Image (cartoon, grey):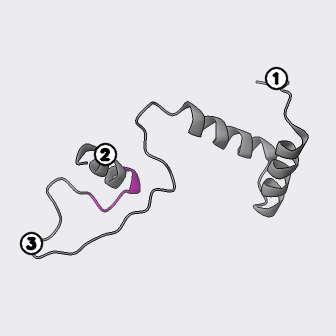
Amino acid sequence: MKTTVELPDELLIEAKRKAASERRPLRAIFEEGLRLVLRKPGGRPRNKEVRLVTVKGGLPRGMDLSSREAMYDWFDKNK
């Protein structure tokens, strides 16, 4: 879908620079930003720092290391 939006010049310039430096289309930068903003409330931030602590006995019950999303979900449920 195409639409028109008005943005501050400095924001558009910064978005274009980011897109160029990552060799991604500007559309992808906008889409990623909208998805972050529209995420359901209580969602986890993408830049959440995770520190794994090893302990005797193995992984906590229900922890799945095969998927980053599954790990984030486990962390959210076990705060």
Q: Identify residue for label 3.
A: 57
10 Å crowding of disc 3: few (<14), some (14-19), many (20+)? few
Residue displayed at 84% across by 33% down: 7
- For residue 65, which quarter of the picture? bottom left
Report the amino acid beneath label 2. Asp
Residue displayed at 59% across by 35% down: 37
* Outermost residue toward the left in this view: 57
Nearer to us of marks 3 and 2 is: 2
Image position of 3 with respect to 19: above or below: above
Q: Identify residue for label 2.
A: 76
Left or right: where does residue 51 sit relative to residue 39? Answer: left
Image position of 48 with respect to 32: above or below: below
Residue range highlighted in magenta: 64-69
Left or right: where does residue 5 sit relative to residue 62? Answer: right
Report the amino acid beneath label 1. Thr
Give the spatial CA distance, label 2 vs label 1: 35 Å
10 Å crowding of disc 1: few (<14), some (14-19), many (20+)? few
